[in-house]
Structure formats: C-alpha cells, structure tokens
C-alpha cells in the first residue's frame, strides 16, 4: 500500500512539474511585452550602398540582419527606429557581416520618433529631424545661405533617442529656465521638442544664461540640448555653411 502511495505521489509531482513547464512556455509565448523583463535592442533601419537590402544598425552590434518576426508583418523604411525584444535572456548574435540574431524576435515594432531643437544665441540655430531642415542662423539677411538639409546617421539617431528617453522630458514644465536666478547678455534660447509614439512634449527655455545650470535637473536638460547641437555642428553640412555674420562678446 505504501509503495502504491509513493508511486501515485511521484506521478502527481511529475504532472505538476510538467504543468509548470507548460505554463511557463505558454507565458513566454503569449504574455504582453510590458509584463516581462525582455532583452531589448534599439536600432535604425539602414541600407547598404548599391543594394536595396535593409539592415538594422544597433549600438554595440553594428549592422545586422533584421530578425524575423512571426507574429505580424512589420513595414519599415530606411531611417525608421526599431525596438526589438527577446524574452530569452541568452540572446545569441552570429558574428559575421552583417551580424544576425540566431532566433526570431519575440516582439518588434517601429517607434514613431522625431524631434526638433532651437539653440544658440537668441535661438538663431534650429533643426527639424523630419525634414532634415538645418539652419545655422536666421539672423542673417539671406537665411537661405545659412540653411541646409541633414539627416542623422543611424548612430546619431540612436544617440539622440537614448538622450531624450533618459532625460524624461515629461518631468519638466513646458516653460523652464535651467539657469533660473542668473542671467547673461547675450543669452541663449533652447526649445526642445520630441515625439515618441503617442507622447509629445516641448520644453521652452528663454533667456538661458551662458553658464552652468543652477540645478542638477537643469544641467541634464542643458546637457541633452548640447549633445544634439554638438552632433549637428560637427557635420560636414554645417561646416560647409558660411561663418556666422555676427559675433557676440
């Protein structure tokens, strides 16, 4: 009798363990992405020169084949920002060119991302990512001579996206001065706008002193704006524009 009981108990335990494994497998396949802690990659769709093949550029990985995604058809174009998630912690990437993920993605989507920035003395410089419209200064007699078109490289776009995501723009008021309490003449104007999927936010900072911010939060905002403006001011397109017509002491 005791032997029969032990056999029955063993069978029940086996069924429990099998059920747990089955439940875990079903959970991994069907749970919404937001309910798990996936391994997440952000990348920008790019093409190889002389080819229509689309790849995705990922920081730390480089150019990579876009992984298969079996749950739905994703339509994307060059320059789109992709979020790619794997529910398995052990994500294997094959070391070749272009690199490739060893398994299909568990979740993938295009992130609707765009931004604009106004910066510099009195806010004379500006950039709009959707159109690539880059203005070195609108204080000149002929603004067209100081205007060009520039679209960010995949690496630059990822840098800006991560900078704005980490900034947590919604934690700032719409009108904000990171140098509150101090002033300068001339001063700077900073207007930072971003759209990430359904979230849109604009932070307007007028009469910003040409100095450090007066708080850590203010310095994060100024550093984010500086990261973007440094990228733009170091492009060949910006450098090809005429020198500023006015200099300020």
Image (cartoon, rainbow, N blue to C red):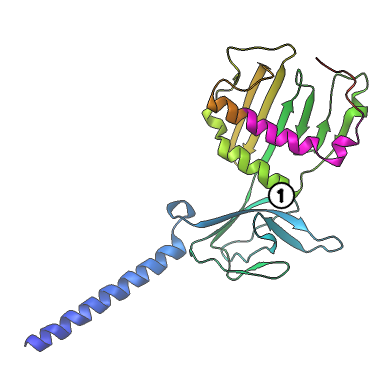
Is residue 54 visible in the rendered image? The answer is yes
75 and 139: which is toward the camera: 139
Is residue 196 visible in the rendered image? The answer is no
Q: Is residue 23 left or right of residue 162?
A: left
Residue at x 90% of width, y 27% of height: 243
Q: Position of residue 84 (x, y in %)?
A: 59, 57
16 and 146: which is toward the camera: 146
- For label 1, count other residues whose C-alpha is less than 10 Å away and answer few (under 14), some (14-19) or many (20+): some
Q: Magenta span: helix, strand or loop, mainly?
A: helix
Quarter that holds the N terminus = bottom left
Label 1 SS: helix
Badge 1 is on which residue? 155
Give above or below for 42 relative to 172.
Answer: below
Residue at x 56% of width, y 39% of height: 166
Q: Which residues are magenta?
A: 222-242
Does 143 appear in magenta?
no
How many marks the image carries: the answer is 1
Give above or below for 24 relative to 117.
Answer: below
34 and 242: which is toward the camera: 242
Give above or below for 233 relative to 112.
Answer: above
Q: Position of residue 48 (x, y in %)?
A: 81, 61
Residue at x 85% of width, y 60% of height: 49
Q: Is residue 136 left or right of residue 82?
A: right
Examine the image and state in which quarter residue 249 appears: top right
Q: Position of residue 215 (x, y in %)?
A: 54, 23
Residue at x 79% of width, y 43% of height: 151
Q: Position of residue 27 (x, y in %)?
A: 40, 63
Does 235 appear in magenta?
yes
């Amino acid at each position: 009798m005791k032997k029969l009981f032990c056999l029955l108990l063993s069978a029940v335990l086996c069924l429990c363990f099998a059920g747990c494994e089955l439940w875990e497998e079903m959970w991994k396949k069907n749970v919404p992405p937001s309910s798990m802690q996936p391994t997440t990659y952000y990348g920008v769709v790019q093409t190889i020169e002389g080819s229509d093949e689309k790849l995705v550029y990922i920081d730390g990985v480089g150019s990579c084949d876009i992984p298969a995604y079996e749950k739905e058809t994703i339509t994307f174009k060059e320059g789109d920002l992709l979020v790619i998630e794997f529910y398995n912690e052990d994500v294997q990437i094959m070391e070749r060119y272009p690199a490739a993920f060893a398994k299909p993605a568990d979740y993938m989507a295009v992130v609707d991302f765009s931004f604009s920035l106004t910066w510099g003395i009195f806010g004379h410089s500006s950039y709009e990512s959707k159109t690539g419209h880059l203005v070195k200064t609108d204080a000149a007699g002929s603004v067209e001579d100081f205007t060009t078109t520039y679209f960010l490289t995949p690496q630059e776009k990822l840098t800006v996206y991560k900078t704005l995501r980490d900034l947590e723009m919604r934690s700032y008021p719409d009108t904000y001065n990171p140098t509150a309490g101090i002033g300068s003449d001339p001063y700077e104007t900073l207007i930072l706008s971003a759209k990430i999927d359904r979230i849109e936010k604009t932070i307007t900072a007028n009469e910003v002193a040409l100095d450090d911010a007066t708080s850590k939060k203010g310095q994060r905002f100024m550093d984010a704006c500086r990261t973007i403006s440094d990228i733009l001011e170091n492009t060949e397109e910006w450098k090809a524009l005429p020198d500023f017509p006015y200099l300020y002491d």
